[in-house]
Structures are given as C-alpha cells and as structure tokens.
Image (spheres, rainbow, N blue to C red):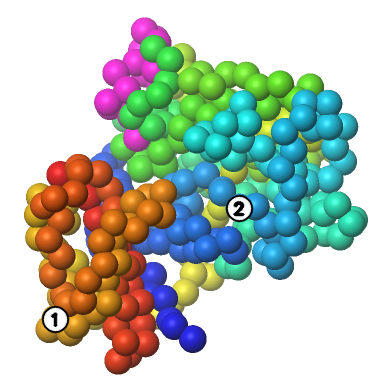
Amino acid sequence: MKKLLLLLLIAPVLGFGQGEQRYAEGTSTDQDGNTFEWINYGTQDWAIENADVMTYRDGTAIPQVTDATAWSNLTTGAWCYYDNDSTKGKLYNWYAIIGVSADGRNLEFAPNGWRVPTDEDWIELENYLIDSGYNFDENNEVEKIAKSMASTNGWNTSYNEGAIGKDQTMNNKSGFNANPTGFREQSGYYNFIGRSSVFWTSTQTTNNKIINRDMYFNRGHIENYNDTSMNKGFALRFVRDTSTAPTKDYSNAITIYPNPTTSIVTLQGGKQYDIGVYTLQGKKVMALTGNTIDMSHLSSATYIVKALDKVENEEVSYKVVKN
C-alpha cells in the first residue's frame, strides 16, 4: 500500500510570538479522503477548515437532506449545503456530529485521531488565543478574539471597533479562518450567510441545551450560543490533543521550493517522481515525471501537488501557491 506523508506545507513549527500571524502547520485526511489543514494552538491541534465529510468514520453514509420539512423532523444525522448549493460549505445537524445513524447505531463523526470538540476544548482554545495576544486590541483581560479567527473576506460590513466586519483584511491573524457560512434553521430554511459562523460542540447542558460558538460580523468577541434545537445546521471543526498526534519525524522529508512561486518549483533531492498537479476542486491540470515543475502557464491560484516516489513507495502532497 502506498504510504502518504503528512508534511508541513507552509511553515515549520518554530513557535510564535505574541499575536504573530499564523498559517497552516500540517495536513490530515478525513475518512472521505479530503485533505484538511491544521494549526497547533498550545496543547491542541485544530482543523482550520470546516468538516466536509459525507460518511461516519466506519464508512456509513450520512444522508444529505435538502427538503425543509424532512430536515425539521429529523432525529438522526444529516447534512446539507447552505441553500442546497454545492458551491457552499456543508452544514450538519447535531445528530450527525454525535453520530446517531439512521439505523440507531452510535458512530464516530470525526476521522481517526480527531474528535468533535467539546465546550471545554473551545474554552482552552479561546484562553490560549487571549493569552497569546490575539485579542484585536492585544489586551488579555476580556475575550475579543473573533476578529483574529475570522476569514479576511465574505463578511457583511461593520463600523464597530474591533468587529469582524470592519477592515476585514486585518482579520485572521490566528489562522483559524472562520467563514461566514450562515446556518440552517430548525424549520429547514437558511439564514445569516455573510453575517454569522456557528460551530457545533458535542456538549449538552443539564437542561438539554447544546453549547455552540457563534461569530457575528458586527462583534469582536465569540458568543456562547446555547440552543435546544438539535435540528439546526451548523459547521464544525475537528480537534485533537497534540500529545495524541502522530509522532513520526518528518524533519528530513522532502520539501518543495520556492513556495509561493511564479514559475518553477523544485522537489528537494535528485529523485525522479511521478507528479500530478491538481486544482483545489480535484481537477488534474498537469502530469509529469521528474523533480521540477514549470507552473508558469497556470493561472494564479492555489494547487495541490502530489509526487510519488515509486522506489520508496511513498507519496507526498503539497499545497503550492502560484502567483
């Protein structure tokens, strides 16, 4: 079986100063074969992309439910696209993220080695970011980290000081990259795209409310959004403890440079690789053998480069930015 090396794609783990801009530190793969990026925050690794699975960990399908009435009556796991538009991200009901399958089994939603975050996981992340200088005013007395966790575009405009929607190019210093995906109401209808990003936790209170996290365009803080509805459709991020992450040393793994590039990138070393270059949508745009890639004819975008070393039977994967 071909071995897949999970590499640091943009920057090595070197430690960060107070409030320093952060980028992806590695990749992992979910049960559907999707690659997602993650960043280490203290004792935790967090996915910096929303969950995109259509199956549970064991391969059991999570059904897509488009009809509003059907969605509102669900008591088992399901997912949807916002507005049933496949160009928008996936949203899940709470039954999906806690693993209630259609046949009544309790299954795992997160990929192997990862989990659905609890309220305590979010608290730990929030405290780490506050203590590390990611409040918009760098004051660590009150939580004001939403701006540093929100994506740099797509939000409605706000004029409130420190709000996500004000000066959006200043967002996302933490690298968490929360997008304003909106959500699906319990009724099955869609709302708040451009205004809100809500993430599930797996924590249910004693009065049966589900604890969530809500980032809103005209606020600079994260709201603990508690709701009794399990039929709303929210996004989710995976988390794992750093202590349980794979420990294989990739310090001598091959690298690709320069990255970003305007034309040619080179795979370190003199080996010959079977190379494929793909768009982020999975379309293959180049195929070659060697250790250099001329990307000068490609449009400015981010691409996935996969290189197979047939001697060692190892495949490496990189995200390369073409300027």
In this picture, residue 227 sits left or right of residue 208: left
Give the percent coordinates (x, y) of residue 145. Answer: 42, 31
Seen at 38% across and 32% down, the residue is 151
Position of residue 58 relative to residue 271, above or below, is: above
Whether residue 199 can be seen here: no
Q: Quadrant of the C terminus?
A: top left
Q: Residues within 10 Å of mark 1 (few under 14, many from 20)?
A: few
- Quick check: 14 above or below 64? below
The residue under the point 75% across, 47% down is 63
Residue of label 1: 269
Give the CA separation, mark 1 to mark 2: 36 Å
The kind of secondary structure element at disc 2 is: loop
**Residue at left 47%, top 74%?**
246
Find residue 287 and report its horizontal and vertical position in percent. 26, 67
Where is residue 115 shown, x and y percent of the image? 62, 58
Kind of residue indicated by mark 2: Val
Q: Please tell me how crowded label 2 is: few (under 14), some (14-19), or many (20+) other residues with Cα within 10 Å.
A: many
Q: Amino acid at mark 1?
A: Gly
Which residue corresponds to mark 2?
A: 53
Of labels 1 and 2, earlier in sequence is: 2
From the viewer's perspective, tell me whether residue 75 is left or right of residue 37.
right
Q: Is residue 80 visible?
A: yes
